[in-house]
Every structure is written in structure tokens, then in C-alpha cells.
Image: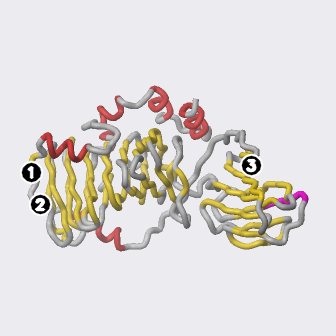
């Protein structure tokens, strides 16, 4: 066997994960000018987003939704079920709502129920400190995109400055492009019509270990991996699709999962080791400007040179034509460069403040 780590990768795909996943979104909310919608700012250990929408309509006077769903909802200290919850037995007057979910910050909020009106409360829950592994931030957003934490039942709109955690899934729509800056200063650009999952991302500077595992379910993404970690032990960074696994230590490359049965990869800088998930004994190594395709039950194709037309095809739909980590980092704004070096509880608020000036 040429590369034992590749077999390890396959075994890890088949084994259940023992990681703790989560998601979070901080920052202050903006006050709406609409007479039918009010955004309420909650002061707690960190910021939580609560949106209260009034609708003049008959029927149930209160609807409570949470992201992620599955939270226990209590109204005036009486359990009403697991979110999303529809509360029909509610008299007009002050109402205290409590929301509880393991590993998330509890929410307490008071509204006033009114006759003839339905109040719909949407709550974006935040992870408690230490309950999830933070991995980075969305630093650029064009068009529409969605995100979904590992234990959520439905996605929410992705917004600039979003903090990503292990297990989070991001999906771009037909006009959507995003750029993610990871805490180790690696960068990933996600093209339109792409679904990316941050399956695992751990860095241990003292032990010189990094374990990154990203999954491109469908679509296209370019990866610019920090070469600072070249000397780290183990397969420091892996990208998986339906048919292939790419192992890298410090390089730039583009992964294109065209269908559930075909993956194409172009190496832009340094080298990539690639296998077919079904045939881990057969490995190819891609050097700069080399391309290989992986189809179901077939070994990766013999690497060929990516001519300008092929390279342009790979880069189509991405928000950057960079071909190295140095190039992509040079495109970051001064705010990006300053914030990627910060490591404090207020970092997320600073992201939002800078990006929403």
C-alpha cells in the first residue's frame, strides 16, 4: 500500500464520529422600521437573535421557531412542547417564553399577546462556551447562501460575518459565492450551487497536529491551505467528495464534484495525493497545474496538464482567480488581516461591526 494514511481516511469515513458539533451567530440586531416586525436585542452572556413578527390573522396566537429546532419551549412556566411549537391556549396579556436546548444558551423573553393578532417568534440559538469547536468566519458573501448546523432540521440564511463550527453545512444558491477564513489562516472559496460541510477542523499548535476534514457534496470549491502546517504530523488536511479523498499538507487546489459519480481536481500549488474511496490502494499524486478525474469504482485518471481553457473552466463561478495562498491572502482587506490574528470573545462582534459599516 503506497499511503497508509489514505486507508486511515477510508476507515474514518466508515466510523461514527465522536466529535461535538455546533454553530453560532453573534452580533447585535438592527431595529426594523416596519410596523409589523420588531427585532429585539437581548443582553445575556452573548448576543442572541430574536425576531418577533406580528400578523393580523385568526388562529393560534403564538408560534415559536428555533434554529436549530428541537428546543424545549415553556410559556408562562408551562411546557408547550419541542420547537417548532404552536400555542393556541393563550390569553391576551404579558407572556414569558423560555427556550432550553442542551449545549445552547437558554433564552428568556417577554412579549404581550394581543387579541386578533398572531405573534411568530423566531430565535437563532447560540452555542454555550466550550460546547462546540469554532473553525472560522464567512468573510465574503455574494448572492444567496444557506447554512445548517449538524443538529438542525432546516437551514437558515447565511450572512456576512457568520462564525462557523465543526459540523456546519453551507450551501450556495445559483447566484451565491462565499469565502471562508479559517482560524489557522487557511482560506476556502465556495462557488455557486455548492454544498460544503466542515466535517472536522482541529489544530493543536503545541503538539504540531492539525486535523481538517471538509466535504464537498456537490459543486466547486478552491482551497488555500496554510503552509505553516507543512511540518505537522499526520494528514493535516483532507477534502472528500462522493468518489474521492484528497490529502494535502500545504497547497492550493480546486475540487469540482460535478455529479455524485464524478470528481475533478486541479492542483495549483505544491502537491496533492488523491484516491478513489472504493479503491484506496491506488494513489495518484498531482503536481502544479495537473488535473485528474475520479469516477465510481475506477482509479484516478493519469494526471494531465491543465491548459488555459481547462483551468478557466475550473475557476468559473469562484470569486477569486488566485492560484496560491499568498495570492488569496493578498486579496484580504485590512480588516480581514487584523481580525484573523485576534483570539478574544469579542472577535465575532468585531467582524460584524466592520463588515456592516
**How many other residues sit within 10 Å of disc 2, few (<14), some (14-19) or many (≥20)?**
some
Q: Is residue 116 above or below residue 202?
A: below
Element under label 1? Answer: strand
Q: Residue at x 73, y 73 (%)?
A: 81
Q: Is residue 211 above or below residue 289?
A: below
Q: How far apart are the two marked residues, 2 and 1, measured between alpha carbons?
A: 9 Å
| Residue 188 % position (x, y) | 36, 45
Can residue 42 be spotted in the picture?
no
Element under label 2? Answer: loop
Residue named by callout 3:
36
| Residue 134 % position (x, y) | 51, 50
Residue named by callout 2:
301
Q: How far apart are the two marked residues, 1 and 3, measured between alpha carbons?
A: 59 Å
**How many other residues sit within 10 Å of disc 1, few (<14), some (14-19) or many (≥20)?**
some
Residue named by callout 1:
304
Q: Main secondary structure of the magenta part?
A: strand
| Rendered-image quadrant of the N terminus | bottom left
| Residue 121 % position (x, y) | 72, 57
| Magenta stretch contains residue 100 | no
Q: Are marks 2 and 1 in contact (CB under 8 Å)?
A: yes
| Rendered-image quadrant of the C terminus | top right
In the image, taking residue 129 as reference, residue 60 lies left or right, namely right
Amino acid at each position: 500500500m503506497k499511503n497508509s494514511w489514505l486507508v486511515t481516511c477510508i476507515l474514518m469515513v466508515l466510523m461514527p464520529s465522536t466529535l461535538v458539533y455546533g454553530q453560532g451567530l453573534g452580533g447585535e440586531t438592527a431595529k426594523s422600521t416596519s410596523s409589523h416586525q420588531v427585532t429585539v436585542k437581548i443582553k445575556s452572556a452573548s448576543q442572541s437573535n430574536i425576531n418577533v413578527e406580528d400578523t393580523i390573522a385568526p388562529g393560534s396566537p403564538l408560534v415559536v421557531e428555533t434554529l436549530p429546532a428541537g428546543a424545549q419551549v415553556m410559556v408562562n412556566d408551562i411546557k408547550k412542547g419541542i420547537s417548532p411549537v404552536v400555542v393556541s391556549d393563550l390569553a391576551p396579556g404579558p407572556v414569558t417564553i423560555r427556550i432550553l436546548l442542551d449545549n445552547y444558551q437558554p433564552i428568556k423573553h417577554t412579549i404581550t399577546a394581543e387579541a386578533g393578532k398572531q405573534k411568530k417568534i423566531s430565535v437563532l440559538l447560540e452555542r454555550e462556551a466550550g460546547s462546540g469547536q469554532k473553525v472560522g468566519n464567512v468573510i465574503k458573501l455574494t448572492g444567496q447562501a444557506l447554512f445548517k448546523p449538524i443538529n438542525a432540521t432546516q437551514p437558515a440564511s447565511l450572512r456576512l460575518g457568520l462564525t462557523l463550527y465543526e459540523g456546519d453545512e453551507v450551501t450556495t444558491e445559483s447566484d451565491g459565492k462565499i469565502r471562508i477564513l479559517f482560524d489557522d489562516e487557511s482560506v476556502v472559496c465556495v462557488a455557486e450551487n455548492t454544498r460544503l460541510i466542515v466535517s472536522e477542523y482541529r489544530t493543536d499548535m503545541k503538539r504540531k497536529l492539525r486535523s481538517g476534514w471538509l466535504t464537498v457534496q456537490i459543486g466547486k470549491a478552491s482551497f488555500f491551505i496554510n503552509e505553516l502546517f507543512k511540518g505537522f504530523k499526520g494528514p493535516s488536511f483532507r477534502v472528500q467528495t462522493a468518489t474521492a479523498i484528497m490529502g494535502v499538507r500545504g497547497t492550493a487546489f480546486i475540487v469540482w464534484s460535478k455529479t455524485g459519480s464524478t470528481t475533478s481536481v486541479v492542483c495549483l500549488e505544491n502537491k496533492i495525493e488523491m484516491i478513489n474511496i472504493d479503491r484506496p490502494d491506488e494513489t495518484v499524486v498531482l503536481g502544479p497545474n495537473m488535473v485528474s478525474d475520479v469516477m465510481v469504482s475506477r482509479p484516478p485518471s493519469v494526471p494531465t496538464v491543465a491548459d488555459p481553457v481547462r483551468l478557466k473552466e475550473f475557476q468559473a463561478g469562484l470569486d477569486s482567480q488566485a492560484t496560491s495562498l499568498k495570492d488569496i491572502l493578498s486579496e484580504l482587506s485590512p480588516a480581514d488581516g487584523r481580525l484573523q490574528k485576534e483570539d478574544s470573545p469579542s472577535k465575532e462582534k468585531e467582524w460584524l461591526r466592520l463588515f456592516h459599516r
